[in-house]
């Protein structure tokens, strides 16, 4: 999971309550801790976080590789797909979706949860 979301002059940490829930579900589904990167990224989550909407970016990394290379380029092809990692990611995301269905989604501190967040 990315450790932060960045604009040119400002970055935002992912929503702590959401990170806690993701980590809890990750441990239960996969039997290991959720790794949070020391580096940030630039994804759609930053715009949500900037407006107080709970967000986090979850990603899968290649074993032993800090930054995946060749994504969305001519070097990116099907031979690079790790089906075991894809299945683990799917199991985690499905477990998280079931958890949200059962318990609702945690809201950002001080933010209005709204009806869809319970």
Image (cartoon, rainbow, N blue to C red):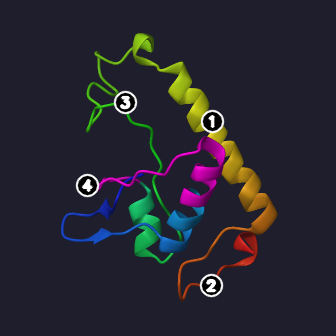
Single out the mark in the foreground, 2 or 4.
4
For the view shown, which residue lies furthest in the left direction? 9
Whether residue 34 appears in magenta in the rendering, the answer is yes
**Magenta extent:** 23-43
Disc 2 element: loop
Residue plotted at (76% across, 52% down): 98
Whether residue 73 appears in magenta in the rendering, the answer is no
* First reached walking from the N terminus: tag 2 or tag 3: 3
* First reached walking from the N terminus: tag 2 or tag 1: 1
Disc 1 element: helix
Q: Foreground: 65 or 77?
A: 65
Specify few, some or many for label 3: CA neighbours under 10 Å numbering under 14, 14-19, or 20 or more: few
Give the quadrant of residue 44. bottom left
| Residue matched to label 4 | 39
* First reached walking from the N terminus: tag 2 or tag 4: 4
| Residue matched to label 1 | 90
Query: Which circle marks residue 42 in the picture?
Result: none
| Residue matched to label 3 | 62
Disc 3 element: loop
| Residue matched to label 2 | 112
Question: Which secondary structure class fits the magenta region best?
Answer: loop
């Amino acid at each position: 999971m990315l450790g932060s979301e960045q604009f040119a002059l400002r970055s935002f940490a992912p929503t702590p309550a959401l990170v806690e829930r993701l980590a809890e579900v990750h441990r239960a589904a996969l039997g290991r801790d959720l790794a949070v990167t020391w580096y940030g990224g630039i994804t759609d989550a930053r715009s949500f976080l900037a407006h107080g909407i709970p967000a986090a970016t979850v990603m899968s990394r290649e074993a032993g590789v800090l930054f995946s290379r060749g994504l969305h380029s001519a070097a990116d092809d099907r031979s690079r797909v790790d089906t075991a990692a894809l299945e683990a990611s799917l199991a985690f995301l499905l477990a998280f979706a079931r958890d949200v269905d059962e318990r609702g989604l945690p809201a950002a501190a001080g933010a209005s949860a709204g009806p869809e967040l319970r």
